[in-house]
Amino acid sequence: MLKFGTDGVRGVANRDLTNEVVTALGRATARVLGGDRCVVGRDTRRSGRALEASLVAGLVAEGMAVRVLGVAPTPAVAWVAAAEGIPGAVVSASHNSFEDNGVKLFAAGGLKLSRAVEIAVEAEFHRLLHGDPAAAAGAVVVPGSVVPGAGDVAQWAASVAASIDGRNLAGLRLVVDCANGSASGISPAVLRSLGAQVEVLHADPDGTNINAGCGSTYPRELQRVVVERGADAGIAFDGDADRVLAVDATGRVIDGDQIIAVCAVDRRARACLPQDTVVVTVMTNLGFRLGMADHGVVVREVPVGDRNVLETMASGGYVLGGEQSGHVIFSDLATTGDGLLTAVQLLDVVARAGRPLAELADDAMTRLPQVLRNVSVSLAGVDVTAALADEIARVEADLGEHSRVLIRASGTEPVVRVMVEAPTAAQAERAADHLAALVADLPSP
């Protein structure tokens, strides 16, 4: 059964996402989102070209003129959608392995869909696919058209380069891991155009090697090469380039929390952080909150999911937010997470400060040991936090002031996530193992 997760529809290509399924999704998308134009892109998976054709076929069948970008980062599609005021779609499974694929949708203007709109698309999709003759017939007599998006990705890239207002990255030596994904061609070129020296890893996609032991999910080789080359920093994208992690000169990973922290401190100093506020999720490290308090930055916390971050940013007029995974949003510059934009913004701070990334990250926050345990158990309908409230309170009291426990059911898998932060890694490990065992023993509903 097709359902939207935290980032679109995702499944195994040719099993969960067949050509028939994706065509129906395209038709449903056109009917619900409306308008007569749409922009579509894809990542480098082997299944991408066929599924892109199926998605476009569905959109065209409903009368849309579809601008096809081919291989393009997700943020490039969102940028075109924003620039043109039209909906967008990306055939991608982000950081998953090549066997999977998915479809991410943007409303007109490059905005993430509300949950209500997702539900409407799901309902129309099921009407189309499962035998409602009236739905299948449709009302469009004249089909739409397909228009090549020549030059659109280059225009997005130019806008990213222009985001640092004429400054450059001259003198920075970088290693960039493109995850054999959609950042492979364009991202190193943008960084070089800004004056950086760039060595590139994993930028030869063959349809099956996307995210394979590389990119933001597997940064070990990047860490090694940064140290071996004496580079100033490393940059690791995921498969569709809407997320990024960094590596400092010592080989240490700088995650999304630390990237946001560095940029928040810099923006506050330059009076470019409205209300001195950032928006992050409950999974953000406690050290981030402590560091931001020290720097006079207010932290707004929301449930996991970039939609929650974006909605809070929009309602409060905030411009910086994101997730530990490296999905960072600069809403004064883009409508969604953009890995290349985030990298350029971070590196601009490094270049202007004339200080190593490691120093900037350490000054912004001190990351507390954080341990995550995934307990494979189906407890749908059970308030796990309430069931273990007394024990959670006892554990937090034992760990002390600079500690935190978070237990939540996954929204996408039959698992309960147990997260513990503590002054030492050993304390966090012991507490997480103890609480995970209690979760595993809870009775199923």
Image (cartoon, helix red, strand yellow):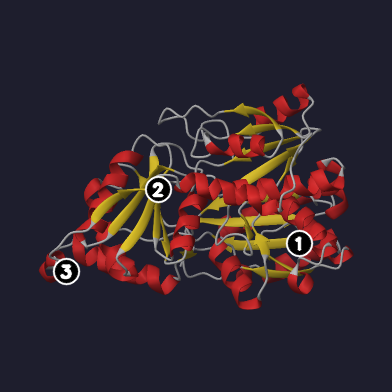
Where residue 41 is drawn, which disc sits there? 2
Q: Is residue 87 left or right of residue 351?
A: left
Residue 383 occupies quadrant: bottom right
Q: How far apart, in angstroms, are the residues tagged by discs 1 and 2?
A: 41 Å
Residue 221 higher or lower than 376, as above or below: above
Q: Identify the residue at horizontal 72%, vertical 49% (top origin).
A: 166
Quadrant where the image shows the N terminus = bottom left
Residue to which mark 1 is pinned = 404
Q: Identify the residue at horizontal 67%, vertical 56% (top origin).
A: 419
Looking at the picture, tell me which residue is in the foreground, 78 or 113.
Answer: 78
Q: Nearer the viewer, mark 1 or mark 2?
A: 2
* Residue 193 percent location from the top left of the image: 65, 37
Residue 66 occupies quadrant: bottom left
Taking the view exactly as shown, the residue that stands out farthest to the front is 166
Q: Is residue 321 left or right of residue 288?
A: left
* Residue 374 percent location from the top left of the image: 58, 50
Q: How far apart, in angstroms, are the residues tagged by discs 1 and 3?
A: 50 Å
Residue to which mark 3 is pinned = 135
Q: Tell me the kind of residue under disc 1.
A: Arg
Q: Tell me the kind of residue under disc 3.
A: Ala
Q: Secondary structure at mark 3?
A: helix
Whether residues under marks 2 and 3 lie with C-beta atoms below 8 angstroms apart, the answer is no
Q: Earlier in the sequence, mark 2 or mark 3?
A: 2
Looking at the picture, tell me which residue is in the foreground, 109 or 363.
Answer: 109
